[in-house]
Amino acid sequence: MITKAFREYKDQDVVFTNANEDLNIKGIIKYLAKRAVATGTASEKELTTTVMVVGMPNVGKSSLINSLRRIGVKKGKAAPTGAIPGITRTVAGTIKVLDSPKVYLIDTPGVMVPHISDPITAIKVALTGAISDHLFDEEVIADYLLFMLNQQQDHSYMTLYNIKEPTDNIHEFLPQVAKYIGALKRGGELNLSAAAQFLIKQYRIGKLGRFTLDDICPESLEIFMTQKAEEGVSRRQQKKADKLEERKRKRVVFQHSQGDSKL
Ligand SMILES: Nc1nc2c(ncn2[C@@H]2O[C@H](COP(=O)(O)OP(=O)(O)OP(=O)(O)O)[C@@H](O)[C@H]2O)c(=O)[nH]1
Ligand SMILES: [Mg+2]
């Protein structure tokens, strides 16, 4: 369904993968190999391609490279990976993932959009782990997660955490989870922040079900892209207006200082 939505939206090539299970890795290698072109001298020509792997932080770029290398050239981990954003810090050369044709990948540090105007989008980005956990309020993120679960009528949290009835109140929900996992502060008070962090982690490892936070269909992709384009235009217009204002202000200051010097 999601693959279809992306394919239908501007004919993009999309493939779902799982670096832990090497899912569709051979298919990606074949796809890359097809892009190899002849390089080198006339006597020593070889087919080769170099591809840069880009994306938001912590989405699995380096893990994908390692997975491609494991299958393609049967070699071990070449790119460092980890469950927090910002593991890859620099662009450090190429990594070979196939010998013939030669396919090289370039791992890159995750890139975050400079500004997220929509607070819900910001919460979704935080929930998926693209922003460092200390930069947001975990209880707000857990509240959104509870909302998403309820919206899908997925009340499996009741059996998972021994909760008697469905709730949409995070202030009722978190204490029950904290109790269930035994998250206590010194002095015996329930540690709600630890309960929220626990839930976020459970979501990220798929224990609360596997679902996308965005509604993905060709229509919603179209709406999203149009909104982004409009936001881009209005930001550019705002920047222009700010520059003009700044120039005007400088001119006034300059005229004042000229006037002052005549006194
Ligand atoms: N379940 C699952 N976990 C994955 C997959 N790919 C990566 N991970 C996990 O996601 C976390 C981030 O993986 P990385 O490969 O370091 O992500 P990255 O995009 O290179 O991150 P940065 O270098 O910080 O931008 C790690 O804990 C991986 O084990 C996947 O396909 N499935
Ligand atoms: Mg990385």
Image (cartoon, rainbow, N blue to C red):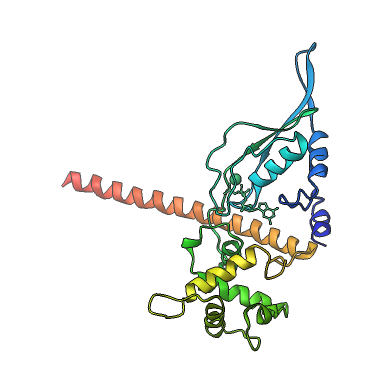
Vertical arrangement, residue 97 with respect to residue 241, above or below: above
Is 121 or 53 nearer to us in this picture?
53
Q: Report the side of 186 relative to 140 (left or right).
A: left
Rendered residue at 38%/79% (across/down): 187
Number of numbered discs overlaid on the protein picture: 0
Side of 1 relative to 200 (left or right) = right
Please give left or right for residue 27 compared with residue 161 in the image.
Answer: right
Q: In this view, does 179 lie above or below 46?
A: below
Question: Where residue 165 sits: x, y (%)?
Answer: 65, 88
* Picture coordinates of residue 135, whole percent (x, y): 47, 61
Residue for point 74% across, 52% down: 18
Q: Farthest residue toward the bottom?
A: 165
Where is residue 139 shown, x and y percent of the image?
Answer: 51, 73
Q: Quadrant of the N terminus?
A: bottom right
Q: Which residue lies furthest to the left in this view?
A: 263
Residue at 57%, 82% (x, y): give it: 173
Residue 206: x percent and y percent?
68, 65
> On screen, 148 above or below 163?
above
Name the side, left or right, on which 257 lies relative to 186: left
| Residue shown at the point (40%, 48%) measured from the top left | 247
Most foreground residue, 93 or 1: 93
Please tell me in which quadrant of the rendered image residue 177 appears: bottom right
